[in-house]
């Protein structure tokens, strides 16, 4: 009797249960690819991840909700991005050179400087928000709006529970009272 052999194929990525890191990477990669493509088409410089982290933090942390920005102090930015002060300073130098950020005197302190998005940085942030919203809309079409709202709510809840950001009031940290 002839012996039959079965072909054994190696499992594909889709056949194996993916861990959480892998599952989170797929949509993140989709969004990052769309952002990179759009920003390149518009002529923005290619930025390193640490530069993007700084710009994102300034864009969120340094906005007072009005037409202008209050900017952010270097010490607060260092705490926000969890990078050494010298590294943040070097990144700001690079970003200032390409007009993505600008430094200005702190109105409350004569020596301290604040940093805010510069003209190119504001345009960059606008495009990032635009592409992010378009990507979210595309995903809502694929998943359905109810599932997308649920996904967003769960991600916001998860982010709130894992972020270790101290409360800030005018640059000062608040301490919990027992």
Image (spheres, helix red, strand yellow):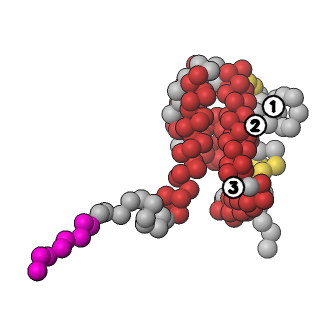
Q: Residue furthest front?
A: 1
Q: Is residue 100 magenta?
A: no
Q: Is residue 2 magenta?
A: yes
The residue range painted magenta reads 1-8
With respect to residue 30, does 48 lie above or below? above
Quarter holding the N terminus is bottom left
Q: Of 89 and 20, which appears nearest the observer?
A: 20
Mark 3 or mark 1: which is in front?
A: 3
Circle 3 residue: 143
What crowding class fits label 2: few (fewer than 14 Cα within 10 Å), some (14-19), or many (20 or more)?
many
Q: Main SS of the magenta segment? A: loop
Residue drawn where x is 74% and y is 55% of the image: 144
**Discs 2, 1 touching: Cβ within 8 Å:** yes
Which residue is the site of mark 1?
Answer: 69
Mark 2 or mark 3, earlier in chain: 2
Q: Is residue 99 left or right of residue 107?
A: left
Residue at 72 percent across and 49 percent down: it is: 141
Query: For the residue carrying disc 1, how many other residues have a C-alpha within 10 Å: few (<14), some (14-19), or many (20+)?
Result: some
- Could you say where residue 152 lies in the image, as x and y percent from the top left? 73, 56
C-alpha separation, residue under disc 2 versus residue under disc 3: 34 Å
Q: In terms of image quadrants, where is residue 8?
A: bottom left
Is any atom of residue 5 visible in this view?
A: yes
The residue that label 2 is drawn on is 62
């Amino acid at each position: 009797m002839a012996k039959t052999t079965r072909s054994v194929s190696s499992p594909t990525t889709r056949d194996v249960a993916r861990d959480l890191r892998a599952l989170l990477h797929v949509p993140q990669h989709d969004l990052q690819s769309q952002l990179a493509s759009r920003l390149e088409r518009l002529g923005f410089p290619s930025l390193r991840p640490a530069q993007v982290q700084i710009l994102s933090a300034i864009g969120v942390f340094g906005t007072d909700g009005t037409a202008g920005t209050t900017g952010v102090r270097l010490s607060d930015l260092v705490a926000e991005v969890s990078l050494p002060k010298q590294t943040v300073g070097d990144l700001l130098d690079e970003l200032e050179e390409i007009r993505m950020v600008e430094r200005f005197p702190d109105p409350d302190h004569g020596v301290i400087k604040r940093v805010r998005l510069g003209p190119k940085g504001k345009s960059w942030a606008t495009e990032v928000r635009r592409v992010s919203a378009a990507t979210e809309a595309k995903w809502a079409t694929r998943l359905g709006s109810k599932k997308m709202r649920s996904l967003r709510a769960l991600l916001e809840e998860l982010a709130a529970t894992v972020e270790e950001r101290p409360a800030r009031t005018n640059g000062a940290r608040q301490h919990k009272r027992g």
